[in-house]
Amino acid sequence: MSLISVGSMAFDAIETPFGKVDQIVGGAGTYIAYAASNFVQPVQQISIVGYDFPKAEMAELESRGVQLDGVEVVPDKKSFFWSGRYHMDMNTRDTLVTDLNVLADFKPVVPDQFQGADFLMLGNLAPATQLSVINQLKTRPKLIVMDTMNFWMDIALADLLAVLKKVDVLMVNDSEARQLSGEYSLVKAARKVMEMGPKFLVIKKGEHGALLFHDKHVFFAPALPLEDVFDPTGAGDTFAGGFIGYLAKTGDISFDNMKTAIIVGSAMASFCVEQFGPNRLKEITKADIDARIGEFVQLVNFDIDLS
Ligand code: AMP
């Protein structure tokens, strides 16, 4: 099953209590592609970069089955740049710099050869940009998953509500689910958000795992307790890439299969945080991924006898 991934490809500067990098490749689309390509190929990438985005990174992505025909290269502008500093708990961070650069004029064009894709992953971008990709598709994908953030709720709520009507799965963190719904209870928040359009809602809670809501059902996946968390940047996007990559591989979009996809996404995110940027995602093999998923099974597996 084919998958289109839309998202930023960027340079990041990151500061955590454990280290600092002034320039490393990042961007939601980059993380999604690295994660999803472990499960499905090709990943059909739609993004925009400047003259400075490393050719070696593009080649690395292509070698993993990521098709870059939908990635516009602007010869006289810089790539998107984001900088953030994490607090001691690593669950919260301050954005220090957002230089949109090429992203300011991003008008995604879906290449003809991407038409007919079964799965669409909309990474965190302006809702109008996300909507433009949906509207260009001649046949609706089997599943549309979308990520967003509080920033768009603050400045583009009407556009965001319009996209929400057209997607199947929304992924947000707990504070964003509360902001969007105006409800503190995540159960009430989920109900309200699902009334806005998406039939499924994933609420990410960083090191405290993730919840999947659908109809009256709820499923919880923990995050793996890790000895060292180096850099959480991109964990949400990596989670999304693993989630949709697994669904695209299996072609099954039932709630039950989404539970497995949530575990797969959590396993991928647990690798992402082990090193700065997407570095760790470039090292891991299928055996590493399978072993990590096995650790999740062990983490939550218990017998209970109430007799
Ligand atoms: P995450 O840690 O999963 O929230 O994603 C972090 C990635 O998102 C970084 O690599 C950034 O380059 C990228 N990013 C941050 N802000 C934005 C934005 N406003 N639009 C698009 N991408 C962004």
Image (cartoon, rainbow, N blue to C red):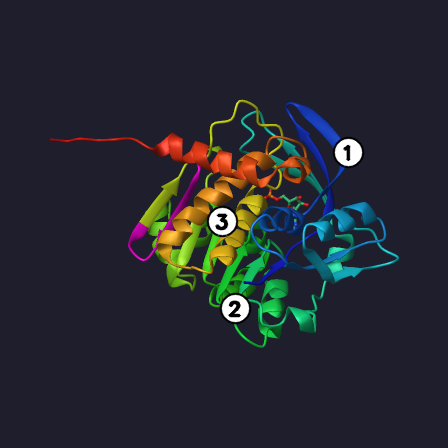
- From this view, report whether residue 233 is shown above or below residue 34: above
Q: Secondary structure at mark 2?
A: loop
Q: Which residues are magenta?
A: 209-217
* Side of 195 where 216 appears, left or right: left
Q: Nearer the viewer, residue 238 or 197?
A: 238
* Side of 227 where 5 appears, left or right: right
Q: Residues within 10 Å of mark 1 (few under 14, many from 20)?
A: few
Residue 263 image position (x, y, % from top left): 44, 42
Q: Which label's residue is closer to the chain start, 3 or 2?
A: 2
Q: Residue 172 got which mark?
A: 3
Observer-side mark, 2 or 1, equals 2
Q: Which amino acid type corresponds to the residue marked 2 in the rendered image?
A: Pro
Q: CA gap, disc 1 to disc 3? A: 27 Å
Question: What residue is disc 2 on?
Answer: 141
* Residue drawn 46% across the image and 34% down it: 223
Q: Which amino acid type corresponds to the residue marked 1 in the rendered image?
A: Asp
Question: What residue is disc 1 on?
Answer: 22
Where on the picture, by quarter, is residue 255?
bottom left
Q: Are marks 3 and 2 in contact (CB under 8 Å)?
A: no
Q: Which label's residue is closer to the chain start, 2 or 1?
A: 1
